[in-house]
Amino acid sequence: MRSRWSARAGVALVAIVALLAPPGVAQATDGVSAVVRAMLRHMTVREKVGQLFVVEVYGPDAESVTPAVAARNQALYGVDTPAQVVAKYQPGGVIYFDARRGPANVQNPRQIATLSNGLQRAALRRRVPIPLLISTDQEGGAVVYRLTAPATAMPGNMALGAARSTAAARKSARVIGAELASVGINQDYAPVADVNVNPANPVIGVRSAGADAGLVSSMVGAQVDGYHAGGVATVAKHFPGHGDTAVDSHFGLPEVTHTRAQLDAIDLPPFRTAIRRGVDTIMTAHVVLRSVDPSGAPATMSRPILTGLLREDLGYDGLIVTDALDMGGATADYPPAVAPVRAFQAGADQLVLAPQMDTAFGAVLNAVNSGEISRKRLDESVARILTLKLKRGLWRPFVDPARAERVVGSAGHKAAEQQITDQTITMVKKDGLPVADAGKVLVTGWGVTTTSTLGAAIGRRGSAVTVRETGATPTQASIDAAVAAAQNQDLIVVSTMNANAAQQSLVRALLATGRPVVVAAVRNPYDIALFPEVKAYLASYGYTAASLESLTRVLFGEVDPVGKLPVAIPSLYPYGYGLSYH
């Protein structure tokens, strides 16, 4: 009885000390504070293993569920509610998703804040109360995001790269960070530190600030500062660099063929900058890099890359988190009982979205109990996780849902969104621009929301607008309809999005009408290489409402375009190219 009471008292004391410890609590020479050491002493092996995992939970509420929510949680974890998932595994972190993955975690600011509070209460009900890292992917832009309106849609990374403003990048990240923090999300899986040197990259593209390592480094450094100022932990991704791949690692295993010299010149500088600026976490990439690891193991499973290159060569001692272990680049050769153990042995500290959680958890636990993973190695990773939580003040994890409603999408944030986005449009060709009096305008091309939003913005300038959306892969019938609608129009504005053969046919058919045509590339800027004969071409790097408003302002000469290409358009336009009206 006495020993049980002593253990309980010790746990309670540790929790109180952790609560009172200020952010950035002093650390010993080996980087581990007395508070963290005390917590480690009172944690069981199972509790420590739980800290290694970052799990998803289904549903918008911690405690109550619908049949659909219960079914998804049961399928993955054998329990009904998000709180029960936390209670079962005692994970170190939870990652939020929107409805594209299943019953959403994110609906509106009050709901998200309430969910976060509920999950944190479940975490603090543990024998050793340890709060959660609650994470999400909110990179900015229109590609990888989870919070939608009323959340502020700051421009994406390549748009920020076009603006060439570290002040804008810092402010953008601060706004995103402040909105996430207000709803209880304390870690953003951002910034993207990849240098997109491959125009055919199917997974990074506009998620990168550009093709120049110096530009990407400056944007990454500013964003790390901005996210921290906004109140969230940062995650630079995807190490050692995903910018020169032609395979999407969600579905396959890409190979980066860079030599070590190329790696030092292209891929590593943004990560070095992030480390110097105090980035909290670095995320791995499911990519093969034989110049560092000839075995062909993906970086996530590679000790030469994670421990040799990142820990030893770059001197990084912060948290390493895997990219999602349920992605094709991880699952192809590493089954559920193998992947988490291999990633941990390679040097990762946290394991994200391990498939078959019971199997994955048991595999790591068995590896520790058998000695395949040493207790010392386990403690090193758990110490990093606990240190980050102390540093970010997470033992005071609760947020005010009413305040969240005031912060998310505030008037000041929306004003910053538009002001920054106005700096991002690149004008590559400008014959006939700006438009003084557009008269009758046909808006056509990719995207139902994109064309309608762009049409509405043009209509607010007094033009008579006709909208004919043609889809991602226009049929001949839709092309013919757009051409018919173009007759007697004063101007045609056509949006392209990574233009495929059908979109190219649409553009050429519209050019053949003889009417003035403006092409607006609303994702990657490379589309003009496919129809270089166009006379007016704008790149917006995104299709948020603010991006389309900024594009319209440039179209009508209300804003002078200052964006410069953050990538080269092969054989046509160099890095840094961009026209203006003055």
Image (cartoon, helix red, strand yellow):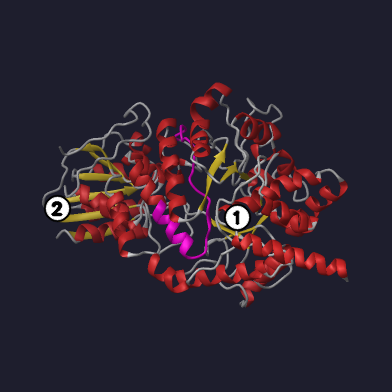
Vertical comparison of 509 with 67: above or below: above
In front: 249, or 562? 562
Name the spot of residue 60 as percent of width and height, x first.
Answer: 55, 71
Q: Amino acid at mark 1?
A: Leu
Quadrant holding the N terminus: bottom right
Name the spot of residue 190 as percent of width and height, x first.
Answer: 50, 48
* Residue range corresponding to the magenta coloring: 174-199
Q: Amino acid at mark 2?
A: Ala
Assign a secondary structure to mark 2. loop
Vertical comparison of 498 with 62: above or below: above
The residue positioned 34% from the left and 59% from the top of the image is 413
* Mark 1 crowdedness (10 Å alpha carbons): few <14, some 14-19, many ≥20: many
- Residue 189 is inside the magenta segment: yes
Q: Which mark is residue 390?
A: 1
Quadrant holding the C terminus: top left
Q: Which mark is residue 438?
A: 2
Asked whether residue 554 is in view, the answer is yes
Displayed quadrant of residue 212: top left
Which of pointers 1 and 2 indicates the residue nearer the eye?
A: 1
Compute the Cα span from label 1 to label 2. Answer: 58 Å
Name the spot of residue 40 as percent of width and height, x first.
Answer: 74, 54
In front: 47, or 256? 47
